[in-house]
Image (cartoon, rainbow, N blue to C red):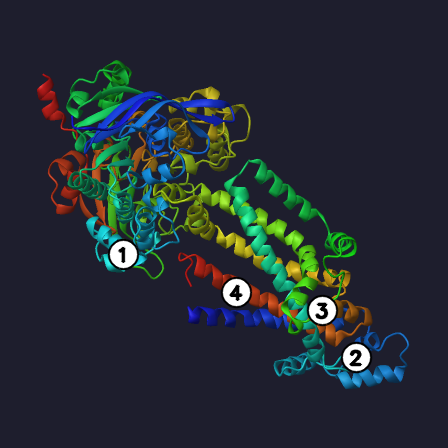
Amino acid sequence: MLSYILRRIVATLPVMAIVALFVFSLLYIAPGDPAVVIAGDQASPEDVERIRQSLGLDRPFLVQFGSWVWRILHGDLGTSIFTNLPVSAMIGQRLGPTLSLMIVTLLLTIVVAVPLGVVAAWKAGSLIDRVIMGFAVFGFSLPVFVVGYMLAYIFALELEWLPVQGYTPLTQGFLPWLENLILPSIALGCVYIALVARITRAAMLEVLQQDYIRTAKAKGLGQGGILFIHALKNAAVPIVTVIGIGIALLIGGAVVTESVFAIPGLGRLTIDAILRRDYPVIQGIVLLFSFVYVLVNLMIDVTYTLVDPRIRY
Amino acid sequence: MSEELLRIDDLHVAFSTRRGMVEAVRGVSLNVGAGEMLGLVGESGSGKSVTGFATTRLLDAAGRVTGGKILFRGQDVTKLRGDDLRHLQGAAMSMIFQNPRAALNPIRAIGLQIADAILTHKRISKDAARAEALELLRAVQIRDPEARMNAYPHELSGGMCQRVMIAIAISCNPSLLIADEPTTGLDVTTQKVVMDLLADIAAARGMATILITHDLGLAARYCRRIAVMERGRIVEEASPRTLFSAPQHAYTRRLVAASPTATSRIEDLVTEEERERYATVVSKPRQEPAHGTPPLLEVRKLAKRFDQGSAAVADFSMTMAGGESVGLVGESGSGKSTTSRMICRLIDPSEGDIVFDGQSIGHVAARDFHRSRFRKDIQMVFQDPNESLNPRFTAFDCIAHPLMRLDGMRAGDALRQRVEECAERVGLPLDLLPRFPHQLSGGQKARVGIARAIACRPRLLVLDEPTAALDVSVQAVVLQLLDRLRRENDIALLFVSHDLNVVRMLCDRTIVLRNGGIVEQGESRTLFDNPKTDYTRKLVEAIPHIETGELLAAAL
């Protein structure tokens, strides 16, 4: 098992290398001279030349790439052009809110969507099933910012149950932290809950038709035992896959959600960086997200082998 | 009869389908005494399994008991709810199923699956349940039970899985066990071992058993009383002896005739009334090939090794003359399917050569063989007609496709005519040609598969268990069809099967395979009457025989 995980980690290295190359090329893919792009519209030719020198842009591409990778491996993501702060420090400051938002959303999704899907499959064709699936279609078709503003209007402005926007770090208490995250998580999780509920239902329907479910019934097992011990674990592979793919969705959604709820997270940082053409920051964020995504994929693959003994490693 | 345990009274079961309610069981009445083993025999769609599921309350959501009573120890099972029902299921009454591997949860260790059943019904600790599960594994004679406790179903053979199912079923000492086709799909030798074990356990524990099967021979061997079902009704109930010597109902007569026995011939597989049509064909003698004609097929030292494993087939040699029929028998894993696939050039041999009609074809890569001029000459009929037909192709497309691909025919009247000829040859009514596979019965699908295979007028037909998925009466018709094709069209048949009765009837010669090598070969009748090796003897003895000789003598 351990050797399998190690092998998988080694296998992700080429992927990360290609991602890094792509991220690095961002600067060159953007139209125009990178130094001019970075320097902005009002820069004098001297400024441009100074930037070119300081960033080493006059050296050959591969040499630049090599030294960039070397610095990253040493934990140096470069310095923001706009704030002159180290990129790693800027990302570090913003990581907490985004991670909080993503984890709460993820937990909310799993806790809500999986049972909904299981119930829908168990009662397939019934009114409950249709209501759940109707909700799923609805959740699927509403954009995050629409749901976000609606929730903020109803629960924060009208009912005043929850804060309208902002973020409180976990260090200042669990409840204040959670209060600020509830609405954004629901808004962000809507699409995700719909997706996971649908997949859970489909996977469960398939499994519930299998012979071994009949065997479980023949043994006299209760409904709960059949659904959660025998069926859900067998249906887990597609569900885990979708939850994993959904994390990519979350990354995109987090950018919008953080804007709607004024959460000082990576999403906001990303938008600000893009607007300011702060390339080192953009590169750092994209690299981080890619890394998280590759890591999630690795975790999914490992989860498969834990869930299903037939998957060999 | 001993004390009555189960009485089914005028049971009706209906299924709601897209086309309305369909009655699957219409008025079945049965009774089973304590400790008795009752055979419930019928073909697919006869309602025998549905009767079993209604009794154990495992009907699909679409199925409903619409009338009658099922009295188990005087209590009406159909009215039980909630906890009362769960105390019945698995505890007082249990069930084992066809296809044991699918019936076990693939991702749960078998020890846990047995313990599940125990923990559901007994208030004992998990450790105690595990200990009991281990005892049960011993009772069903699983070797090395301690190690097997943590095994998953995919690590066990089909026979082993069925033993685990039996262990689950008997875990709470039920007084009634319903076994639904418990050995269908298992090898003959495994089949015998599993059935013997089941019978022993039932006898030792005084457990009544209903054996649901399509195999009259199997029921006759283990049951004192057999009920025959047809289209949702019990048409006859009698002892095996009476059933075979003096079947009363026309359907029983047909079923008895269609069940191959140790001495039956192909022409015996139909009742007296149907036999006349067939007689004219059989009487036509087959043309013996002139002396000195080269063999149609010659296989030399064929071997197949899959990645890193030991040889699946090794040193396999045989010859076949045109119009000859050769049987290839052996248990699963013996390499018979691998061999047949190499011969029809679907997979590449690792060693050796295949010579067809004087030309070496063993070295043509399997993926290029479709361009060979011999592709037309060697065709295949696959095991399961339900799975091997493209669900989006009509019967017509299925038969027409090889004609277009291999004979270069274009859509038009000529093609239509050829397809219709083929359909007629295999006895497929022409009005069925526009239908899709799901609109055809099992026997009709088998005919489409055969029509497709003979469409290009092949000289060698390789058949991989072509009747394994079919009812006996359909099997009888298909076998007669194959025999007729061979006699009339001089098509050589290579028949791969685990059903020795069938091979003995259809094939001139038989080759017995074991672990990828030939154990014994020779003229079919001699080989089966006087097997020379222990392995062949074991295979022959495992066939559920119906002691027709004795029965006939008794009837006379």
Q: Do badges 3 and 1 share one subunit?
A: no
Label number found at residue A265: 3
Tell which circle, 3 or 4, labels the residue nearer the N-terminal end. Answer: 3
Alpha carbon separation for disc pair 1 and 4 = 36 Å
Q: Position of residue B529 (x, y in %)?
A: 12, 35
> Depth-wise, is mark 1 or mark 4 nearer the camera?
1
Q: Is residue B149 above or below residue B474?
A: below
Q: The residue marked by circle 4 belongs to what chain?
A: A
Q: Which residue bears the numbered disc 1?
A: B128
Tell which circle, 3 or 2, labels the residue nearer the N-terminal end. Answer: 2
**Where does the N terminus of chain B fall, quadrant-wise?**
top left
Q: Which residue bears the numbered disc 4?
A: A299
Q: Position of residue B334 (x, y in %)?
A: 26, 48
Could you tell me if the residues under marks 3 and 4 are in contact, i.e. CB atoms within 8 Å? no
> Depth-wise, is mark 3 or mark 1 nearer the camera?
1
Residue type indicated by callout 4:
Met
| Residue at left offset 18%, top offset 36% | B524
Q: For the residue labelled by badge 1, is the local secondary structure a helix, a strand or a loop?
A: helix
Residue type indicated by callout 2:
Ile
Could you tell me if the residues under marks 1 and 2 are in contact, i.e. CB atoms within 8 Å? no
Residue type indicated by callout 1:
Ala
Q: Is residue B91 above or below residue A154?
A: above
| Residue at left offset 60%, top offset 60% | A106
Q: Is residue B317 left or right of residue B76?
A: left
Q: The residue marked by circle 3 belongs to what chain?
A: A
Residue A91 appears in the figure: yes
Q: Is residue A291 left or right of residue B399?
A: right
- Dividing the picture into quadrants, the one containing residue A290 is bottom right
Q: For the residue labelled by badge 4, is the local secondary structure a helix, a strand or a loop?
A: helix
Alpha carbon separation for disc pair 3 and 4 = 24 Å
